[in-house]
Image (cartoon, rainbow, N blue to C red):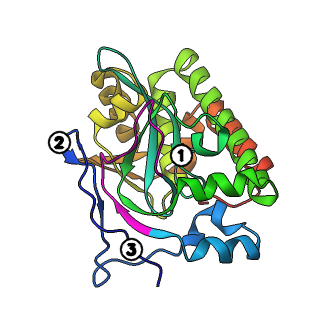
Amino acid sequence: MLPIAELNAGQEYGGLMNSEVPMNTSTCRISDPRENQLLAVLPDAKWKRWQTSLELVDLSVGQVLSEPGRTPSYVYFPTTAIVSLLYMTQDGGTAEIAVVGNDGVVGVSVFMGGNATPSQAVVQSAGQAYRLHAQMVKDEVDNGGPVLKILLRYMQAMIAQVAQTAVCNRYHSIDQQLCRRLLLGLDRLPTESLAMTQELLANLLGVRREGVTAAALKLQVAGVIRYSRGHIDVLDRVRLQNRACECYGVAKKEYFRLLPMPLAA
């Protein structure tokens, strides 16, 4: 079994502690590191080298994995957790620029040469991830080869997601933005249920909560979703996708073009 990260006390975020909690193996399924699609395509030689250094961590909602302007100590490969990359304004407003789940990695500044990033990485959906010391990933990238190629292709896909998010926020309605964001979450989870409050969605989209409430009500009345106490069950994914704008499909198509690995169906 891979080593499990020890409890780390962290700073408080949104009323939750920023900590990585050891897994309770008696009650929780231990995810396979190769459920992360970047780890899954590592060549065997690189995989064997990384395998013994990967640490399994349990990530909680609201946990901050990296802060703006700081060099991260670890790189995270989510398996069942979902992480939001957020930009924050001086007056405390937030907006999500990208979503990272089992399709990617958190901490790209480590291997892109910038060491720090202006965005904040916050756990949006609790779950598991595997982490590596940032220096180990940086050394691997500096050596070139297949790891560098995989990560650069992922970064190109990530840039496409960020670009489409900017276009979506500028030109498309809150209704369309909400549908796109729900689909991004579904792609990275094995279920059709999302643990998300309307307040959280409003913060992620950078809009007023009333707008999200109205958009969610339309979807519920139409029988596309069912919302109850911070949980959104998607009842009709096809209709949800039909109501989303083209931004969702464009970014997903680019990911498949660069990294032909299946996201959730």
Query: Which secondary structure type mostly characterizes the magenta part of the structure?
Result: loop
Image position of 259 with respect to 171: above or below: below
Q: Please give the range of residues in magenta.
A: 56-73
Q: CA distance from mark 1 to mark 3?
A: 20 Å
Residue 4, disc: 3
Residue 45 coordinates in the image, percent (x, y): 75, 75
Q: Amino acid at mark 2?
A: Gly
Q: Going 55% across and 15% down the picture, which residue do you hit?
A: 170
- Assign a secondary structure to mark 2: loop
Image position of 246 with respect to 157: above or below: above
Between residues 209 and 204, which one lies in front from this camera angle?
204
- Give yes or no for residue 76 being in the magenta stretch: no
Residue 118 coordinates in the image, percent (x, y): 49, 27
- Nearer to us: label 3 or label 2: 3
Q: CA distance from mark 2 to mark 1?
A: 24 Å
Q: Amino acid at mark 1?
A: Gly
- Assign a secondary structure to mark 3: loop
Q: Going 30% across and 70% down the picture, which residue do you hit?
A: 22
Label 2: how many residues lie within 10 Å, few (<14), some (14-19) or many (20+)? few
Q: Mark 2 — residue?
A: 15
- Assign a secondary structure to mark 1: loop
In the rendered image, which quarter is residue 11 located in? top left
Residue 107, disc: 1
Left or right: 198 in relation to 79 = left
Residue 121 coordinates in the image, percent (x, y): 43, 41
- Which quadrant of the rendered structure holds the C terminus? bottom right
Between residues 139 and 159, which one lies in front from this camera angle?
139
Q: Amino acid at mark 3?
A: Ile
In the rendered image, which quarter is residue 20 located in? bottom left
In the rendered image, which quarter is residue 161 located in? top right
Q: CA distance from mark 3 to mark 2?
A: 25 Å
